[in-house]
Amino acid sequence: MNSAPSAAGVLVAPIAAALNPSCAGGDHAGVLLEHTVLRWLAELVGFPHRPGGGLLTSGASMATVVALAAARQHAVGRDGADVREEGLYGRPPMVLYVSAEGHSCLRKAAELLGLGSRHVRVVPVDGGFRMDVDALRALVTRDVRAGLRPFCVAASAGTVNTGAVDALDEIADVVAAHGLWFHVDGAYGALGALASGAASAGYAGMVRADSLVLDPHKWLGVPVGCGCVLWRDPALARATFSLIPAYLCDDHEDGLGWFSEYGPEQTRPFRALRTWATMSHLGRDGIIRLVGTTVRLAHTLAAMIEAAPDFELLAPVSTSIVAFRFHPVDRTTGWTTSTAGSPRSSSTAGAPS
Ligand SMILES: Cc1ncc(COP(=O)(O)O)c(C=O)c1O
């Protein structure tokens, strides 16, 4: 999850510190490089990119707040109101759907945005720890009937427990049928789309997201402190956050505005340099190799665990995460020491402990 830092990222860190720009906006290397890096990240995973279509953040937790704020703004706007002006007063509760394996930052964001954790629906998962799409459908239908306002489904492209990638394409269909916002948490796993063969198959619907979170400081190995959110429609994000007092007016702005209009931060550090250096050094082929190698290693480890009598694989391997446990066999009986006292199943059973 938290990779070793890339050498290139470490080497340029002092330069970013010495230059010490604020990347709120303006016409300087920090800002230009951030635009470049955002386009590169989107292109890397095949996400549609328009200028202004992303923001570097401190990490995925902040990126999630920014993404869900835009989703909330959009949904309330479609109902003919403005959440920035009116807040959520007097509205039906807005409901967010996450899987039981979704990251806690989703619930934190919902709480922070005034949605209330009571209105975060936890959708059960299937045997592969992926969101149960039928259950999602049923929950949305039930909430609509109850007069609530479903507004966003947050799917996972690589969960923290098992690396599971939800059925993104199928979920996108449900989202489209109900006119919801499709958020994908690819903080750790979005880069898995670069793996070859079956490993990347589950990512097909990722390009349909309205917002995608993808952390350079995870699989890519950028030194910690660099998350990212990408949007399909940058104008929506700008409409969510833009606030320009007289002392921040830029008569020469380029039409995209400042990064500080796309998120809550005003003074922003030079996050792009470490990401730019890491990506430049590896190149696209190098990043594909990095992903391929780690996915291959995960499968090798999984095979070793399956062959070892005292270890148990707890989930299918779909990215670079292997969930397993030590589960010793009683040599006298040949049975495991599980509390149920039953022989161990040979494959993937049960939730990770
Ligand atoms: C899938 C997923 N989403 C979100 C996060 C939160 O990311 P951050 O710690 O960068 O805020 C993590 C962190 O491990 C994660 O694995």
Image: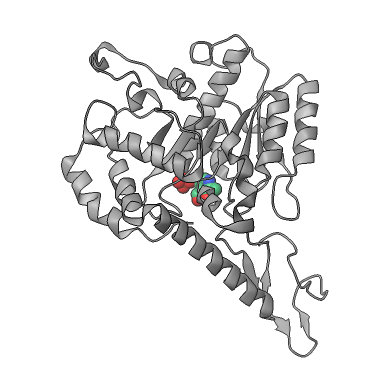
Taking the image as drawn, is residue 165 in sight? no
Q: Residue at x 34, y 34 (%)?
A: 35
34 left or right of 127 in image: left
> Can you give x and y, in whole percent of width and height, for residue 59 in the image?
42, 43
260 left or right of 180 in image: left
**Residue found farthest to the right:** 342
110 left or right of 143 in image: left
76 left or right of 222 in image: right
> Can you give x and y, in whole percent of width and height, for residue 334 in the image?
78, 85
- Picture layout, residue 152 above or below residue 204: above
> Can you give x and y, in whole percent of width and height, for residue 18 in the image?
16, 44
**Residue found farthest to the left:** 18
**Residue found farthest to the top:** 80
The quadrant of the picture occupied by the C terminus is: bottom right
- Picture layout, residue 335 above or below residue 107: below
Q: Residue at x 28, y 56 (%)?
A: 8
Q: Quadrant of residue 55?
A: top left
> Can you give x and y, in whole percent of width and height, for residue 53 in the image?
44, 30
Q: Residue at x 24, y 50 (%)?
A: 13
In this figure, what is the number of numbered marks? 0
Identify the image's colour scheme: rainbow, by chain, secondary structure or one colour: one colour
**Camera-side residue of 300 and 213:** 300
- Picture layout, residue 103 above or below residue 334: above
Taking the image as drawn, is residue 148 in sight? yes
